[in-house]
């Protein structure tokens, strides 16, 4: 049986959010990344902790950040709003993280 996934630290969340998290739950579907839904009194967010492996030198965080920057410049308001990027988080394995503000409908 798979153990409980460690949650992101309050230190990481306080750097990325101006609100206090009220609920944090693991979300499936992140492939080899860890994903959580973070609820505050005002909003819902998705937090993604990027996979790192000593045998894979690809910088997935930098690639995705570059994509979001490009996509936002081409279709502003049509992609999820990135609340924050943290390239050196204090997560379970010091992996980079990003947090997105959840929207009801996103049209690309």
Image (cartoon, grey):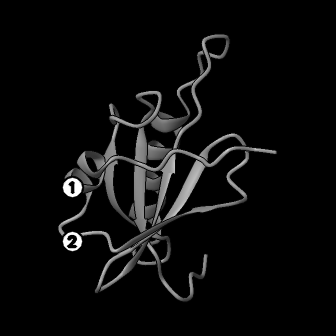
Q: Where's the C terminus, which quadrant?
A: bottom right
Residue at image position (50%, 71%) is 79
Q: Secondary structure at mark 2?
A: loop
Q: Secondary structure at mark 1?
A: helix
Residue at image position (40%, 28%) is 94
Instruction: Locate residue 48, reporting x and y percent.
Output: 51, 51
Instruction: Locate residue 104, reporting x and y percent.
Output: 53, 88
Instruction: Locate residue 106, reporting x and y percent.
Output: 56, 81
Sequence-earlier tag: 1 or 2? 1
Q: Where's the N terminus, which quadrant?
A: top right
Which numbered disc covers residue 14?
A: 1
Q: Name the one closer to the observer, 52 or 65.
A: 52
> Hey, which residue is sitting farthest right in the picture?
1
Which numbered disc covers residue 19?
A: 2
Residue at image position (29%, 85%) is 41
Q: Is residue 78 above or below residue 50?
A: below
Instruction: Locate residue 98, reporting x and y percent.
Output: 41, 51
What is the crowding at mark 1: few (fewer than 14 residues within 10 Å), some, or many (at least 20)? few
Residue at image position (46%, 33%) is 92
Residue 73 lies left or right of residue 48; in this view the side is left
> Hey, which residue is sitting farthest top in the picture?
55
């Amino acid at each position: 049986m798979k153990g409980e996934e460690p949650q992101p630290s309050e230190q990481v969340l306080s750097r990325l959010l101006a609100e206090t998290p009220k609920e944090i739950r693991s979300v499936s579907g992140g492939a080899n990344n860890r994903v959580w839904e973070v609820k505050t009194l005002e909003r819902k967010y998705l937090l993604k902790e990027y996979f790192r492996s000593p045998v894979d030198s690809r910088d997935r965080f930098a690639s995705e950040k570059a994509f979001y920057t490009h996509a936002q410049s081409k279709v502003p308001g049509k992609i999820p709003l990135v609340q924050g990027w943290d390239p050196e988080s204090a997560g379970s394995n010091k992996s980079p993280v990003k947090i997105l503000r959840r929207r009801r409908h996103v049209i690309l």
